[in-house]
Image: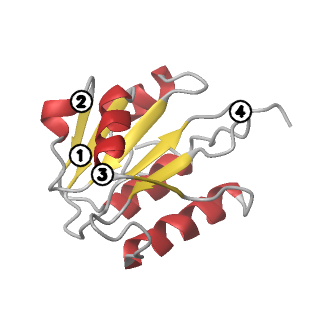
Amino acid sequence: MLKSIDPLLSPDLLMVLRSMGHGDEIAIVDGNFPAAAMARRLVRLDGLTATAVTNAILSVMPLDDFVPEAAWRMEVVGDPGAEQPIFDEFRAIIARHEGLNFRLGSLERFAFYERASAAYAIVSTGETRLYGNIILKKGVVRNE
């Protein structure tokens, strides 16, 4: 155990987050996502939800504020403008950790797959809600 570090952040996930550089991306995906087939680096957190993992990651990792978008969700197939309840949860987590300057972008399913497969790492969760997938772009930690 570590002080002030969310216990959901496993040793493997902490190593990945620490190894990532500015602009690298990490995908947090649901249990239906083909993570093992796509991942350059795979971290498995099967018993956890995508929202809990996203919250834990954003407790230690800043989003990139040098780009127009730094977080993306997968669009609903056949209805790209449709909203799923998990999307609002992702937005609330981003706002809690990064403020209201960041919006949750969206990517068509296969564009999301392509971006996830190019990500530095994929975190495969036990999320059972459909479209429980998000990609985050790492920013810089500023001396304040």
Q: CA distance from mark 3 to mark 4?
A: 31 Å
Q: CA distance from mark 3 to mark 1?
A: 17 Å
In the image, which disc is placed on residue 104?
none
Mark nearest the camera among 3 and 4 is 3
The answer to whether residue 115 of the structure is visible from this angle is yes
Q: Which residue is mark 1?
A: 124
Mark nearest the camera among 3 and 1 is 3
In the image, which disc is placed on residue 39?
2
Q: CA distance from mark 2 to mark 3?
A: 16 Å
Q: Secondary structure at mark 3?
A: helix
For the residue marked with disc 2, what is the amino acid?
Answer: Ala
Q: Secondary structure at mark 2?
A: loop
Crowd class of label 2 (few under 14; some 14 to 19; many from 20; radius 10 Å): some
What residue do we see at 61% from left, 25% from top?
22
Colour convention of the picture: secondary structure
For the residue marked with disc 1, what is the amino acid?
Answer: Ser
- Tag 2 and tag 4, C-beta contact below 8 Å: no
For the residue marked with disc 4, what is the amino acid?
Answer: Val
What residue do we see at 19% from left, 58% from top?
126
On the image, which quarter does residue 43 sit in? top left
Mark nearest the camera among 2 and 1 is 2
Q: Quadrant of the C terminus?
A: top right
The answer to whether residue 5 of the structure is visible from this angle is no
- Tag 2 and tag 3, C-beta contact below 8 Å: no
Q: Earlier in the sequence, mark 2 or mark 3?
A: 2
What residue do we see at 34% from left, 30% from top?
121
